[in-house]
Structure formats: structure tokens, C-alpha cells
Image: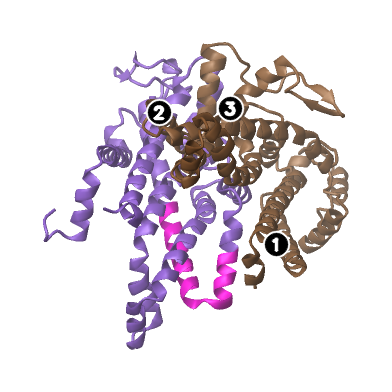
Amino acid sequence: MLGFLIQRLLQAAVVMLVISALVFIGVFAIGNPIDVLISPDATQQIRLDTIARYGLDQPLWRQYLAFLERLLHGDFGRSFVYNMPVLELILSRLPATFELALAAVLGATLIGVPLGMFAGYRPEHPLARIAMGVSVLGFSVPTFWIGLVLILTFAVWLPWLPAGSRGATVSVLGVGWSFLTVEGLRHLLLPALNLSLFKLAMMMRLARAGTREVMLTDMVKFARASGQSEWTILRRHVLRLISIPIVTVFGLEFGSTLAFAVVTETIFSWPGVGKLIIDSIQSLDRPVMVAYLMLVALLFILINLTVDVVYALLDPRLRTRNR
Amino acid sequence: MKPAATPAAQFWEEFRESKVALVALAVVVAVAAAALAAPLFAPQDPYDIAKLVLADARRPPGHVGSAGYVHWLGTDAQGRDLFSAILYGLRISVQIGVAAGAIAFTLGATLGTTAAFVGGRVESLIMRTVDLQLSFPAILLALVLSAVLGQGKAQLIVALVTAQYAYFARTAHGAATAERVKDYVEAALSTPLPVRTVVFRHILPNCMPPLIVVATLQVANSIALEATLSFLGLGLPVTEPSLGMLIANGFQYLLSGRYWISIYPGVALIVLIVAINLVGDRIRDQLNPKLRR
């Protein structure tokens, strides 16, 4: 097991190194940030000073090595646009994205699992059919368009909810949160709903497939024979059995929700990391782009590593088969 | 079913049994035809600036424009007939989706079958890379790539292909691994045919059914991805106005209630994507041995 763990950690480190090189080279190919940083009527001296300050006069491989060294010290450089340390900038935006993603995934689970279980328990019921039909839409329709329809419906035609931004936040532990006030919740509702629809469709399908399978097993027959009510069977037995794949997917999806938030945050001007990265791409703020990509890569590699290790713990065959 | 029917005709007979899939197929064909023949159908060439009249800008659906015909879906901020703009936008979206799908198909199928056939280090290198890529969300990869490569049709197709070939490679690898151990492969290899011919002329055709399913779904996916990227301002340049860009342009007018500029292009997009997905689902069900009668 220790050998397996070391091997996987080494693999993860190599992958991170490759990704860092790809990201660095890729991002540096975009264009000349000097044009963005320095106004056209600046003096030659200011130009040279700025170039030297950001290390843009060095050869590319030197810039990369310097970047790698700083990376290992947890220093991602300074944002060209915001003129503050990138790590600080991203960390200050992270709670907003985190809150949004968590609300979306939680909402999708809390609504999707009961609906999916119902659809699996009574597959012929009209409500179940409607729910499954809607889930097809949740899979096919692009997130950004659903966001527009939500804004149009609930912010323009029915002026119930705000169309964008985050509203006032309450500071807890030095971080601003929206979900603690009614105003904040009103701002959170539409973006969270938008982000959750895809996950909702997936949770429904998972819960439905699982429930249909479990309902056919002998276990359910015996539970019925022992006189338990249908409600108890669903809640105590079926839910417990189908929760294993659901929890796995919940964990995996949380990572991809953070990535998908890019679209939702842009539409609802939610001040999170996703909006930050789109803004940085448009203003060629390279340190922010590089740092964001590295952090996302790290996040996904950690998630995959955890999944691998947990599966290896659960299934001894995976430990011996590795090469 | 007639006994003499070819496999293709049999497949079609079976496909026709699902009314939903038949309607979806008709929609796909109609939309694709309308998009490709857009210059013939569209009441206006939306990108001929001489034909645009600013007095017609942002008119609601049904408005009779100064050119004398009805703008059934309204006009946008430049006075462009939205119906024409949607047809031209669909054209670009379909082109990009099909091109990206076809290239990803070729690349992925080649990589996947090669990996399955060669085995060893080559196989583990290719499939490890594919697995790694599949663990990242496709939208993120496409986003990063189009940010790095810049705007343009070719760049966008490269980004979409890179984000999607892995699905084809995975599928082809699975199917080819199963085919490889069968007797007919053994027999073909014992003849003096070059290995390349055996891989691509004997094994690959037998891996086609699952690949076709993936292909239909991935074309729909690349159309949606392209729209998303163009909406975020990262996909196509302004000179290639796809549906995503039409939607993005209408976004700022949405809050003042001029819904049609954003909503109708979106409806066109969704009708197309849902129809392609329904056709793909039907083909998948038909090819799934578990559901076969």
C-alpha cells in the first residue's frame, strides 16, 4: 500500500510539472502584456523599468525556472491589473465561488435524489415521466442559455430576484458570506439554480437507476415480509444502498462545479474566481491565468489521487495490478 | 422484416419504430439543410452592412421593417433581421461542430485502435494521457486552449478537438481490445497483409457502432461548447458570428426586456442540440446488445 501511495504521488508530481510547463508556455504565447501594462505615451525609461520589474526581458526558460521556484515557495507573482499578490487575489475570490458551488451541488442532491428515488420507485407515474423528461433538457441545454432564461423570467418579467452581483455579505472569520442574510440568499438563488441544473439531472438519473435496481432485490422482499412500511424501506434501506455511488459522484462533481462556475459567474456577475479568470484572459493578466490554471490542475489531481487511494483501500486487487 | 434486407435497411426499419427519434432526425436534417442553404432562405444578408437600417434596430418580433418584409423574430441592435442572423449563425455552428467532431473522431479512433493493437508502453502512454484528460471537464480544457490559441475558426476547432478526441480514443480502445483477440483478426494476421491494413480495414470497421454513437453525441457537445466559448467572448472572432455570439450580443438588452435578441438564437441552438441528442440516444439503444430483442 505504501509503495502504491508513493508511486501515485510521484505520478501526480510529474503530471503537475508537465502541466505547469504547458500552462506557462501556452499562456506566454497569447500576446504581449507590455502593451497592456504600459500606456502608449509612457517614456522609454518607464517602459524598460516595467519590463525589468516583471522579468519580461529574461529568456523564456529563465522566466519559467524563476516561476517554478516562486511556485514552490507559494508565490504566484503579482497581478498586472489589480497590482496585488495573485494568491491573495484568488483566495479573496474563492469563498464566493465555493459558496456558489456548494449551494449548487447541495441543492442538486437534496432535490435530485428524492425525485430520482421517486422516479425509480414509481417509473410509470406521470410525475416521474415529467421529471425524467426535464432531466434530458438539463443535460442538453447549455448552462449559459438557461442562465439567460432565468434572468429574463425572475428578474425582468417577474421582478422578484436580483439579476446579478452578490449583494451585501456578512463577514464570518474574516470572509464574506451571502447565505446568512435574506438579501444574500436572494442574490444566491438564481446563480445556484443555474449551476445546479446539470448536476440535478445527473443526481436524478443516478438515484433512479439505483432505486430501480435495489427495489428488485430479495432484500426489499424480506423487508416487506417483515412488515416494514414502504416509506421505511425507501428511507432506511434503499437510500443507504444507493448513497455510495451518489457520494462518490458528489465529490467528483464538486470539483467540476468549481470549473463550470466560470459560465454562471460571468452571466450573473458573481464576483468569484470564474469571473476573475475570464476577466484576466480578456485583459491578458498572465500571472492570474497561470495561477488559476495551476490551482485547478492541482485540485483535479488531488481529487483523482484521493479517488484512486480510496478505491485501492476498498478493493485490494487494484493495489497489486498497478504497473 | 424482409429477409433480404441489408443491415443498413434493417437498421432504418428499426429506427423508424421510434416516432420521437424520427421527428428528431427530421429536425436535424431540416435545420442542417436550412443552415447550409442560408443565403437562399434568409430574407436578408445580415452581414452586408449596406442593407442594415438603424431605424429598424431592436424591433420586436412581427415588426414590418423599412425594407418591406416582416421581421418574424425581431431585429438586433444594428437593425439586423434576427431570423437571417440565426440562419447564418447556425451555418457557422454546424460547420464548426461537424468539423471538430470529424477530426476528433479520426484522431481518437486512430489513437485508440493503435493503442489497443500495439499494447505495451505505447498503449499505457496513450491511454494514461486520455484518462488524465477525461478527468478534467471538457469545457475547462476548451476554455484554456481557446484563451491560449486566440480567436479564429481553426484555433477553435483545435481547442474543441483537443477537448473531445479522448472520448473517441477511450471508446475505440475498449472496442478494439475486445476485437483484437477474435479469430478473424488472427486469420487476417496470418495472411501477408500489412498490419496497418488489418488494424484499419478489419478491426476498425467492427469498432464503428459504439464510435458512431459517441460521434453523434460529441457533435452536439461541440456545438454547445462552441456556443459557450463564443458567449464568453473566447471562441470565434466578431467576423464569424455564431449563435453563441448572437446570444452574447443580445445579453445587454435582456435586462430592458428586449428578450428576442438573445432568446431566439438560443432556442435554435437548443432545438438542434436536443434533436441530435435524441437521434444519438436512439442509435445507442439500437446498438446496445442488452436491449436487443
A199 shown above or below B129: above
Q: Position of residue B122 (x, y in %)?
A: 56, 74
**Amino acid type at mark 3:** Leu
Residue under label 1 = A15
Q: Are marks 2 and 3 on the same chain?
A: yes
Q: Nearer the viewer, mark 2 or mark 3?
A: 2
Circle 1 packing at 10 Å, graded few (<14), some (14-19), many (20+), is some
Q: Which residues are magenta?
A: B100-128
Q: Is B45 left or right of A270, judged from the image as shown?
A: left
For image coordinates 56% across by 39% down, the residue present is A237
Q: From the image, which quarter does the C terminus of chain A lie in?
A: bottom right
> Residue A197 at what x, y percent from top left?
54, 32
The majority secondary structure of the magenta stretch comes to helix
Q: Residues within 10 Å of mark 3 (few under 14, many from 20)?
A: many
Q: Which residue is mark 2?
A: A130
> Which residue was labeled with disc 3?
A193
Q: What's the residue at 51%, 17% (across, down)?
A: A153
Chain B: colour as depicted = purple
Using the image as rendered, state which of residue A225 and residue A242 is in the foreground.
A225
**Amino acid at dot 1:** Val
Q: Position of residue A10 (x, y in %)?
A: 75, 66
Is residue B226 visible in this depiction of the protein?
A: no
Cα–Cα gap, marks 1 and 2: 44 Å
Q: CA distance from mark 2 to mark 3?
A: 19 Å
* Mark 1 → mark 3, Cα distance in angstroms: 34 Å
* Residue A239 visible, this angle: yes
Which numbered disc, 2 or 3, marks the residue that appears first in the sequence? 2
Precedes in sequence: disc 1 or disc 2: 1
Instruction: Look at chain A in the picture and name its colour.
Output: brown
